């Protein structure tokens, strides 16, 4: 009958010590790596959220630019007709509704995140809206000559300033989106590189 000899206590202790050393080395490298990965993921998520908000804001600015251009065209249609007829009334009402919806969304962006800095735009739009409402009221009253005079007396300039401000804000949001996307991509690359260093770091730890 074959008898198995028990391992010496010193050998068992050495094996246990080696196992503990391996576990300690693993966790001493793994925990920081996981912490870095979690922190990187959180930062990347925030950067992507900022990029998405910038893109959404740009789309809204494009929509309001289209509505302002449309309103300007409707004003001149009224001047050319010499009145605000039924069709024009309906188109103006639709334009006001669409513009109001876009402006409400832009107000939400401005309140949630001050980086958008839309105060100048809102002030410019308020000036333009007041002026063009005066022109439309004169047309509705049949005072076309007075409407043309009011239009020539600053409305075109206000419109041009508002349009230029919208273009500036659009470019700003595009730049903001591109910058944050690049930062997010760099963060992703850094996270992948950091995790890729884990096996080598563990090996060095064990050898040390």
Image (tube, grey):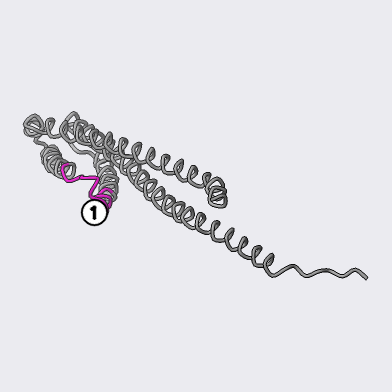
Q: State the image coordinates of residue 85 (x, y, percent, origin top left).
A: 22, 38
Horizontally, residue 46 falls left or right of residue 125, namely right
- Image quadrant holding the N terminus, namely bottom right
Quarter occupied by residue 180: top left
Q: Is residue 165 magenta?
A: no
Q: Which residues are magenta?
A: 106-120
Q: Is residue 110 magenta?
A: yes
User: Which residue position holds label 1?
Assistant: 111
Of 182 and 76, the residue lying toward us: 182
Horizontally, residue 152 falls left or right of residue 53, namely left
Image height of 116 relative to 156, above or below:
below
Image height of 73 relative to 99, above or below:
above
Query: What residue is at 69 percent from the left and 65 percent from the top?
Result: 11
Q: Which secondary structure, mark 1?
A: helix
Of 21 and 89, the residue lying toward us: 21
Q: Main secondary structure of the magenta part?
A: helix
What is the total number of numbered labels drawn onto the structure image?
Answer: 1
Q: State the image coordinates of residue 30 (x, y, percent, origin top left).
A: 52, 55
Query: What residue is at 38 percent from the left and 37 percent from the top?
Result: 182
Q: State the image coordinates of residue 202 (x, y, percent, origin top left).
A: 55, 50
Horizontally, residue 48 falls left or right of residue 29, namely left
Of 98 and 192, the residue lying toward us: 192
């Amino acid at each position: 009958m074959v008898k198995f000899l028990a391992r010496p206590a010193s050998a068992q202790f050495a094996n246990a010590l080696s196992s503990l050393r391996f576990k300690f080395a693993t966790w001493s490298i793994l925990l920081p790596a996981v912490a870095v990965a979690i922190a990187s993921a959180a930062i990347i998520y925030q950067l992507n959220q900022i990029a998405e908000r910038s893109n959404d804001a740009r789309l809204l600015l494009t929509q309001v630019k289209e509505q302002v251009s449309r309103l300007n065209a409707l004003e001149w249609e009224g001047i050319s007709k010499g009145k605000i007829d039924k069709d024009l009334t309906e188109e103006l009402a639709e334009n006001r509704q669409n513009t109001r919806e876009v402006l409400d969304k832009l107000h939400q962006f401005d309140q949630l995140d001050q980086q958008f800095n839309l105060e100048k735009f809102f002030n410019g739009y308020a000036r333009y809206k007041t002026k063009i409402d005066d022109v439309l009221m004169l047309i509705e009253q049949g005072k076309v000559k007075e409407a043309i005079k009011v239009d020539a007396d600053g409305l075109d300039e206000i419109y041009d300033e508002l349009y230029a401000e919208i273009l500036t804000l659009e470019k700003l949001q595009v730049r903001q989106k591109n910058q944050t996307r690049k930062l997010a991509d760099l963060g992703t690359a850094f996270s992948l590189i950091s995790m890729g260093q884990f096996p080598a770091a563990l090996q060095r730890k064990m050898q040390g």
